[in-house]
Image: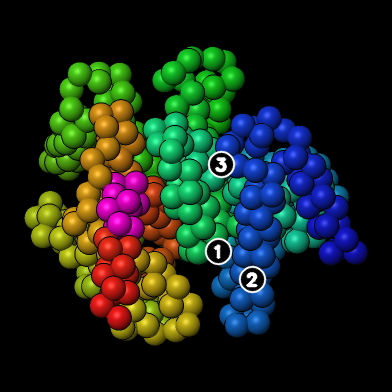
């Protein structure tokens, strides 16, 4: 019955992909879209099997632990709709009638509260809402998440395609086919919600920059709301990059690089002033999260891919000195020559491909035009910002792989678009012809 229900949802989504204008206008054929959707479904199933067979501790698997808490929340509706809505919206939390449900949910509350938004609840709530149509069938949740992920990727594809209309293949590969992105954004995890937020925000902003419409404004606002409910470090990296992108598009007489550098100087200055005046404990919170993560990974969870990065003090000097190694750590790990477990092989290969792309770009650089440079610089600065947050705060290689996943479509696509592939192809053909003539 579970499989039949999931297949019914899959059939419905295939019809939507076939009929809806959003998909028809993507520039991708129906067959390609179905192929990508199928890859996402297979990735969701693979992730499900991984956490069912390889990692057997259900309470530690993100794909199950939020789902199980959502099941408690959903079951409360059967007992009392009033209790459900109080739990869902965190209203009247001192009510004794809610206590049994809070006690049954293991991840509604964080182990340590840093006074920031609890994004665990976002995923639990989303799962609980979906249970009104899935009735607790997790495979339906996988199917819906795969469809949502497809929408997010198409949004990004449309934005990049506007700036590079002749590079459809490169953009499609970078946006849709990076293995880590496929794997971690095809089930109902935080990464899927992050990609939806990024996709909707970029697409809505793109539409508004060219023709402001209520429809486009609604997409933009929805994207901002979705993005703000999960992974605040992604928001922190995204805001200055997107602000610079907007300004560079509005004031196109100024070189985009000047705008981006200026915005990031202002952002860094704001962090310094904030730390000196003590308005928001930004560095203190970041240092606490890193140090607590180290304690949990090294001494309690005994994480297999733990790396010794050392505790950090909440000072400007400590974070400045940590920045170069943090960026390098987040960018290069896992390294292909130092793989600790099979799951690290694919991201290690992706890192190697990224290095190859950078080398190719250095030798065969294709200069983008002024309009194109805005999206390229956005991708680069967003990637650097996200790498900094991940590198500074994360002492586990497996976590690094997942936390930096949102930047992969932007970074890989932008690098590929800045390479003159024709020169590389011509070079290879000349060598092949020369080799054949010698023979």
Mark seen at residue 249: none
Q: Look at 9% across and 55% down and name the residue there.
A: 317
Mark 2 or 3, which is nearer the eye? Answer: 3
**Residue identified by numbered label 2:** 46
Q: Is residue 347 above or below residue 99?
A: below
Closer to the camera, 196 or 391? 196
Alpha carbon of mark 2 to alpha carbon of mark 3: how far? Answer: 22 Å
Q: Is residue 61 above or below residue 369?
A: below
**130 left or right of 150?**
right
User: Which quarter of the rendering shows the C terminus?
Assistant: bottom left
- Range shown magenta: 414-426
| Rendering coords of residue 422 (x, y %) | 32, 51
**Residue identified by numbered label 1:** 183
User: Which quarter of the rendering shows the N terminus?
Assistant: bottom right
| Rendering coords of residue 12 (x, y %) | 81, 45
Q: Look at 81% across and 57% down and name the residue there.
A: 6
Closer to the camera, 106 or 195? 195
Q: Is residue 220 above or below residue 272?
A: above
Please check the rendered image and state whether residue 78 is part of the magenta-colored stretch, yes or no: no
Alpha carbon of mark 3 to alpha carbon of mark 1: how far? Answer: 17 Å
**314 left or right of 132?**
left
Q: Look at 54% across and 45% down and name the residue there.
A: 153
- Is residue 102 in sight in this rendering? no
**Residue identified by numbered label 3:** 154
**27 left or right of 393?**
right
Labels 1 & 2 near each other (Cβ < 8 A): yes
Name the magenta segment's main secondary structure: helix
Q: Look at 19% across and 57% down and name the residue there.
A: 363
**What SS does tag 2 mark?**
helix
- Is residue 435 in sight in this rendering? yes
Q: Where, by quadrant of the figure, is residue 112 drawn?
A: bottom left
């Amino acid at each position: 019955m579970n499989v039949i229900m999931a297949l019914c949802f899959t059939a419905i989504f295939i019809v939507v992909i076939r009929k809806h204008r959003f998909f028809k206008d993507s520039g991708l054929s129906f067959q390609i879209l179905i192929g990508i959707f199928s890859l996402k479904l297979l990735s969701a199933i693979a992730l499900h099997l991984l956490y069912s067979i390889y990692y057997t501790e259900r309470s530690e698997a993100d794909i199950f632990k939020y789902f199980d808490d959502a099941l408690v929340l959903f079951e409360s509706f059967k007992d009392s709709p009033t209790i459900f809505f109080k739990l869902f919206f965190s209203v009247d939390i001192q009510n004794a009638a809610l206590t049994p449900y809070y006690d049954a949910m293991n991840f509604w509350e964080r182990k340590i509260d840093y006074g920031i938004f609890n994004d665990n609840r976002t995923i639990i709530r989303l799962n609980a809402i979906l249970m009104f149509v899935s009735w607790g069938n997790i495979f339906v949740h996988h199917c819906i998440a795969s469809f949502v992920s497809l929408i997010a990727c198409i949004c990004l594809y449309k934005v990049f395609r506007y700036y590079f209309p002749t590079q459809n293949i490169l953009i499609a590969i970078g946006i849709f086919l990076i293995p880590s992105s496929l794997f971690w954004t095809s089930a109902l995890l935080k990464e899927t919600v992050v990609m939806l937020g990024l996709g909707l925000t970029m697409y809505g902003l793109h539409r508004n920059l060219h023709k402001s419409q209520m429809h486009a404004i609604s997409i933009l606002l929805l994207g901002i709301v979705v993005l703000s409910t999960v992974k605040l470090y992604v928001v922190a990296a995204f805001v200055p990059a997107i602000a610079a992108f907007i300004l560079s598009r509005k004031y196109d007489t100024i070189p985009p690089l000047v705008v981006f550098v200026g915005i990031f100087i202002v952002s860094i200055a704001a962090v310094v002033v904030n730390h000196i005046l003590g308005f928001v404990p930004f560095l203190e919170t970041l240092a606490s999260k890193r140090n607590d993560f180290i304690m949990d990974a090294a001494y309690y969870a005994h994480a297999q891919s733990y790396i010794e990065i050392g505790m950090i003090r909440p000072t400007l000097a400590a974070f400045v000195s940590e920045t170069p190694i943090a960026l390098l750590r987040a960018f290069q790990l896992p390294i292909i020559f130092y793989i600790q477990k099979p799951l690290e092989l694919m991201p290690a290969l992706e890192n190697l491909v990224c290095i190859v792309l950078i080398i190719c770009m250095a030798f065969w650089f294709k200069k983008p035009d002024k309009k194109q440079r805005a999206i390229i610089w956005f991708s680069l600065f967003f990637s650097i910002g996200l790498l900094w947050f991940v590198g500074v705060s994360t002492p586990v290689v497996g976590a690094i792989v997942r936390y930096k996943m949102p930047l992969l479509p932007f970074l890989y696509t932008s690098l590929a678009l800045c390479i003159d592939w024709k020169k590389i192809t011509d070079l290879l053909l000349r060598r092949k012809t020369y080799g054949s003539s010698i023979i």
